[in-house]
Amino acid sequence: MTHRRNFIKAAGATMLGAAAVSRTGAASLPEAAIQTATTMQPPPAPPNGRPFNPVATLNGWSLPWRMKDGVKEFHLVAEPVVRELAPGMKANLWGYNGSSPGPTIEAVEGDRVRIFVTNKLPEPTTVHWHGVLVPSGMDGVGGLTQAHVPPGKTFVYEFVLQRPGTHMYHPHADEMVQMAMGMMGLLIIHPKDVHQFRVDRDFAFLLASYAIDPGAATPRTSEMTDFNMWTWNSRVFPGIDPLVARSGDRVRIRIGNLTMTNHPIHMHGPHFEVTGTDGGWVPKSARWPEVTTDIAVGQMRAIEFDAVAGDWAIHCHKAHHTMGPMSHTAPNLIGVDQRAVAERISKLVPDYMPMGSGGMSEMAQMQMPIPENTLPMMTGDGPFGALEMGGMFSVVKVRDGVRAGEYRDPGWFKHPAGTVAREYTAEDDDAVPRAVQPQADDKTLRVRKPGGHEGH
Ligand SMILES: [Cu+2]
């Protein structure tokens, strides 16, 4: 395995496709492809089996399979991995096939799949196929439906995929530790009819959270609430891939939540509809327009929208989840005059810098020094200055003329002239109408009466 890994790395970390598998003559086990890249590897069209339109896993990849007598064979290897969460911060996680989350498994409604799971962890594991109706004995609950997979052993799961949808896989063995260490992945079941539920762009990612103390690299697995790395596919802003689309594209984003809290995911710009849950696709008549959808723990939501040109922020709306590591017990110093105390402290600590009297924005502006192997509380540069973000934040970048299958970052949006908010100056006086001050006798003034109903 080590030898194979080096071989693949030497080849530029390209995925080893199903075609290359026979090289080993692999008596029984299909090759376990390895991928350690942290940028999206858009999967090619399926080389065999029923056709489908692959998903684009943010900062991730899809697992190649081997077709054997009409059965799709996949090979997952549960193992320790090193994952860069964002430039400047690496984490010691557990994952599958070189990455956390593990590779996305994609197959088609009606497919029979055989999934080999090799355990290279120091403790037993299992794989549960979250939301997939499988024979009870294939459900992956250690002790309940199967014996645990001991370290060094390989188990095999086999079932027929009965219904199209978006699902997740994760251990059901020492779950608290193994999921806090990053063991999870997506399982996408495409419809048998390639035209059903068809979209132009189909993104997918998992929400995960980690508690990694500044300077450390291994998550504290006993943490229940105070996480500091709020990730999409085990990446944090500015390490999360942008979601690139062409104007007019029908775009789907599938989001699964395997953290320990809910995440209201909010998208700026075009309104979307919730079109899918773990339970399947929502009938057209039951969909409703939204700009934020809350994703509870253990849930998946698929949203769809028609892309409009621009740079549209997409993020969790819990403000602490778009932040990097920070102390949650820092006092609020807004309005506090720190000058006198700063003078006294700087006699003891020459570099002391009082902050916070006017909010925390200056922390993003000046990129304060931080310990090794952690991330700033807020960071990122946009075309107009500091973004002051972290954690669960990315940008839907919609442009005219993006080619189909093109996911490369197109850079910042070029706003048409006169469409950017700007400073108001005195010269504008003639051009811009003054704000109207309503007068008491203004016939159009509407007031809300204490009774709750409107009157004039
Ligand atoms: Cu959140």
Image (cartoon, rainbow, N blue to C red):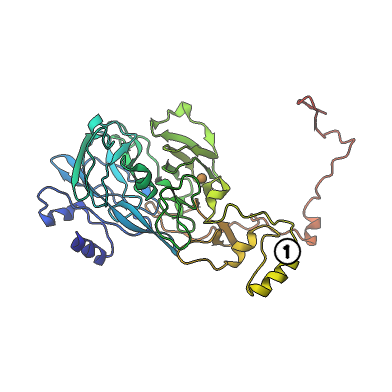
The residue that disc 1 covers is 338
Res 384 seen here: no
Instruction: Give the camera-side residue of 308 and 230.
Output: 230
Q: Dividing the image into 4 quarters, which one contains the N terminus? A: bottom left
Instruction: Give the camera-side residue of 349 and 437.
Output: 349
Q: What residue is rendered at 19% in x and 41% in y? A: 156
Residue farthest right in this picture: 441
Badge 1 marks a residue whose secondary structure is loop
Q: What residue is rendered at 70% in x and 59% in y? A: 358
Q: What residue is rendered at 82% in x and 34% in y? A: 444
Decide if residue 448 is on the left or right side of residue 193: right
Res 130 seen here: yes
Position in image of residue 202 (x %, y %) = 39, 45
Position in image of residue 392 (x %, y %) = 49, 50
Could you classify mark 1 by the number of other residues whose Cα lies within 10 Å: few (under 14), some (14-19), or many (20 or more)?
A: some
Q: Is residue 342 above or below residue 394?
A: below
Amino acid under disc 1: Gln
